[in-house]
Image: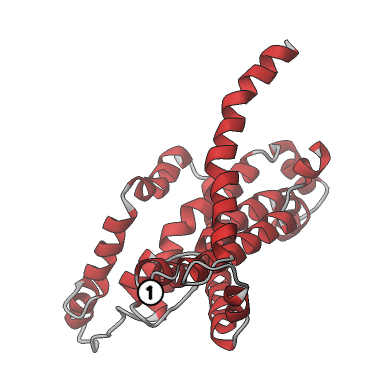
Amino acid sequence: MHKIKSFLLVPYMIWIILFIIVPIAMIFYASLLDIHGHFSLENYTNFFTSSYLKMTLSSVWYAILITFFCLLVSYPLALALKSARHKEILLLLIILPTWINLLLKTYAFIGIFSHDGLLNKMLNIFHVPSTDLLFTSTAFIIVSVYIYIPFMLLPIFNAMEEIPENLIQASRDLGANHITTFRKVIMPLTYEGVKTGIQITFIPALSLFMITRLIAGNKVVNLGTAIQEQFLVTQNYGMGSTIAVFLILAMAFILIITKSKSENKEV
């Protein structure tokens, strides 16, 4: 049986080596080369200049905002879905937009936020002055939150579904009101779901580039857009790889600090 398990692990290990370890090693190696292909630490020196540090802080700030607003919407929504009569159908309706291509959803929002778009047409009906929301940081946050809400919602909803109903009933039998039950029972038992939601929202929000370009224009510059510019515009693969190295390190740091208790016990 042990030999069979070891044999079944072979395809998985090959996949890990070819598509995770080797690409990361190639990125790290490329980060040590300057624009002429010579070995140099110039890229790392450049990364710690004020312009790149400001861009990094900006990326972290926008990722925090996106994650916060996703949590702000998703937690009450998950709480409402838990007690809803047709929660499976409602959950499906929330998840359904994730089946649509990201580029199509982004262009749909361009049509909504543009000067002659749906939003301004609705404002004109109520005689409200039109707004130029497209190509602003606000539009970028709205679209990003819309896209990542299902990813924040699902782990929180699953954590709430796993709470035994008799625990909630017991807290009420002992005299706890709805607020106390929520604070003492529901919140602690959904903490792991919240951490998972933060992981799968914050990490990709750090490296957004397509939404940033199409929705925010040049109003938002983050690590994702910087990598795209270095590889596709200036063709400075070394600098692009250096930014990617720090992005990978930031993602690893988030994974470590939000590691669940169950994972710690297994280790």
32 or 58: which is nearer to us? 32
User: How many circles with numbers are drawn on the protein?
Assistant: 1
**Visible residue check, residue 80:** no
Residue 63 % position (x, y): 54, 69
Residue 163 to residue 193: above or below = above
Residue 217 lies, in percent from the top left, at: 33, 78
User: Is residue 144 something one can see in this rendering?
Assistant: yes
| Residue type, label 1 | Thr
Local crowd at mark 1 within 10 Å, few (<14), some, or many (≥20)? few
| Residue 235 found in image quarter | bottom left
Q: Say which residue appears at 72% left-offset and 10% top-offset.
A: 1
Vertical arrangement, residue 134 with respect to residue 32, above or below: below
Instruction: Judge from the rendering whether residue 154 lies leftward or rightward of residue 163; answer left or right.
Output: left
In this picture the colour scheme is: secondary structure
Residue 256, located in which quarter of the rendered image? bottom right
**Which residue occupies the foreground of this view, 50 or 124?**
50
- Residue for point 60% across, 59% down: 248
Query: What residue do we see at 53% from left, 49% from top?
Result: 23
In the image: residue 239, left or right of residue 179: left
Q: Foreground residue, 50 or 176?
A: 50
Left or right placement of residue 116 versus residue 204 in this view:
left
| Residue most extreme to the top | 1
Image coords of residue 13 (percent x, y): 62, 31
Residue at label 1? 234
User: How far across and down, in percent of the image, does residue 51 sit?
Assistant: 54, 86
Q: Label 1's element?
A: loop
Residue at screen point 54% across, 68% down: 38
In depth, the one of 263 and 15 nearer the eye is 15
